[in-house]
Image: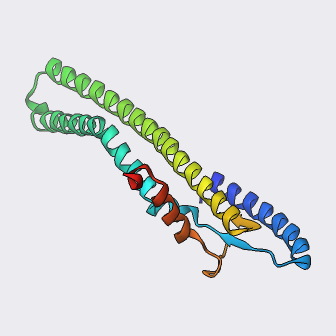
Amino acid sequence: MQTGTFIRRVLGAVVLAGALAAVAGVAQAQEARIAAVNSDRILRESAAAKAAQLKLEAEFAKRDKDLQDMASRLKTLSDQLDKNGASMSATDRAAKQAQLSQLDSDFQRKQREFREDLNQRRNEELAAVLERANKVIKQIAEQQHYDLIVQEAVYVSPRIDITDQVLKALAASSPAATN
């Protein structure tokens, strides 16, 4: 488990424990309404998340193809050097090795930049999906008079899981649904 995820879950558990203690005090006076939403399912199954994934694939397709082409050139050049290196003059072999080394450095740099850019854009798109989901969750909470809706929990009873309801509401509120 990544450290950030672990810390987020521990902090979520602490916040949840505090919130449940507060709700327990209110629950003595009246019945508290509690629900839970699985954020991971929202990010996997929602139409908005799927649209974001398609958008990212389209946005990064050309760079991915360029990287694949560069990897192919790198392999071809390496194979040529392996096959013909022994029969080449020392000068030609050194030039081919320098060319191979330069191409490999360029490939590694472009691959790293690609991954960084893709991760940044993915985080931006997923943050937008979660922001929309949080607005929908808040609307559901207000309409159905929930006292507490949690998104991170160790265990959630299917009885209080409203993830399907949130997915439906997100789909209904998406720009594509209004067309």
* In the foreground, 177 or 163: 177
The coloring applied to the image is rainbow
Q: Residue at x 73, y 68 (%)?
A: 145
132 up-or-down from 20: above or below = above
In the rendered image, residue 98, in percent from the top left (x then y), is placed at 26, 22
User: Left or right of 59: which side holds 22?
Assistant: right
* In the foreground, 105 or 18: 18
In the rendered image, residue 138, in percent from the top left (x then y), is placed at 66, 58
* In the foreground, 77 or 87: 77
| Residue 2 can be seen in this image | no
Q: Residue at x 55, y 64 (%)?
A: 166
Q: Residue at x 34, y 38 (%)?
A: 59
User: Left or right of 44: which side holds 166?
Assistant: right
State the quadrant of the N terminus: bottom right
User: Left or right of 114: which side holds 76?
Assistant: left
In the rendered image, residue 147, in percent from the top left (x then y), is placed at 77, 67
| Residue 98 can be seen in this image | yes
Residue 115 lies in quadrant: top left
In the rendered image, residue 175, in percent from the top left (x then y), is placed at 43, 49
152 up-or-down from 111: above or below = below
**Count of numbered tags:** 0
